[in-house]
Amino acid sequence: MSLSASEIGVGLPALPRLTTTVPKEYVHRASLAEVFLTGCTAQDGGVRFSLTGQWPRAHTFFNSTDGASHDPLLAAETFRQAGMFVTHAEHGVPLGHHFVLWSLSCHTDLEQLRIASRPTDFELEVTCPDSAQRGRSSARRMGIGFALRRDGRPVARGDGLYSIVSPSVYARLRANRPQGGATSTETVAASGPMDPIAVGRTSAADVVLTPTDTPDRWLLTPDLGHPILFDHGGDHLPGMVLLEGARQAACARLAPRTLIPASTSTEFNRYVELDSPCWLDVTGVAPGDDGTVTVTVVGRQNGETVFSSRVNGPVA
């Protein structure tokens, strides 16, 4: 009969704390591979949070065209995840509540996005000035700020505004809306999707735009089965799809040059529905004194402005 270590009085060394991702449900992702956060520590009475995370060296979607850098929109997606995680895990909002994104900005240092010989570990400070409004309220707005660092060096900063909506309120808001399936954009598309190179992409599977007969106008036609953009189900187009559409429209406007989206600022006015065409119009192109270009993109659906985005960065 053998004895355990505790029975014979032999002390075992304490095991180190091992790294893992935060629960995927807290960031509204279906795949663990798409969760970029690994931990969180609350500070300043729950107003400020220190998060940790990791970006892979080679992501199938959030990558630069040359494969040497992280896509700046990866920082925006990380901000989105951080806002949801803090709200669920630290502010006590139950799973099943919905998030309505009203605005999101992300400003990156492109030099700090270069990919090294190992995955990119980062620290993310999240500030929630509205965190006093906690608990299970059916609907409220939250402002949030982000500051992401890598080895102590600033990489990205931004802020966002979103509403938290209970399932019952969301059901009333979305009554009689489609629950998924093909969009009606198939009937209005003038041709096939854009050439990937023309929209700053390397894979045809990642193209979300179709050209139209109108100058500076494109039809938003994402693949609803895309494993990253539609990682989890929904009854409308996600905010990250709209950001990607704005980036691609900016690149299409400047083609054959490619705009690197170092800075994005987006306002979301209403849901972008799955059953109606959404048109993306470039309404302004402004060269900067620093060699960058700012492109303004407006999304319209059923005669209404559904979102607007300013995409700024160098042109390659």
Image (cartoon, rainbow, N blue to C red):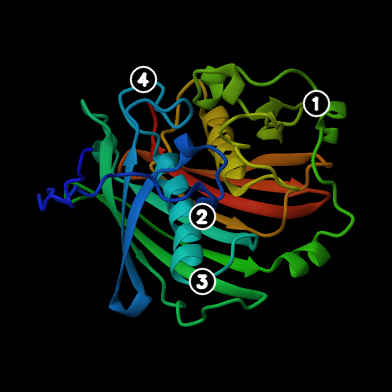
The reply to whether the C-beta atoms of the residues labelled 4 and 2 are less than 8 Å apart is no
Disc with the residue nearer the chain's start (1 vs 3): 3
Q: Say which mark, if any, is on residue 88.
A: none
Place of residue 284 in the rendered image (x, y in percent of width and height, measured from the top left): 56, 45
Q: Residue furthest bottom?
A: 132
Provide the residue designation for mark 1. Answer: 189
Label 4 to label 2, Cα distance in Å?
32 Å
Q: Say which mark, if any, is on residue 92.
A: 3
Place of residue 149 in the rendered image (x, y in percent of width and height, measured from the top left): 25, 51
Disc with the residue nearer the chain's start (4 vs 3): 4
Query: Looking at the image, which residue is at 53% across and 37% down?
Result: 31
Kind of residue indicated by mark 2: Tyr
Query: Looking at the image, which residue is at 45% across and 27% down?
Result: 258
Provide the residue designation for mark 2. Answer: 26
Answer with left or right where residue 164 lies relative to residue 273: left
Q: Say which mark, if any, is on residue 66.
A: 4
Vertical side of 310 occupied by 110: above or below: above
Kind of residue indicated by mark 3: Gly
Circle 1 SS class? loop
Disc with the residue nearer the chain's start (3 vs 2): 2
Circle 2 SS class? helix
Circle 4 SS class? loop
Disc with the residue nearer the chain's start (2 vs 1): 2
Of discs 2 and 1, which sits in the foreground? 2
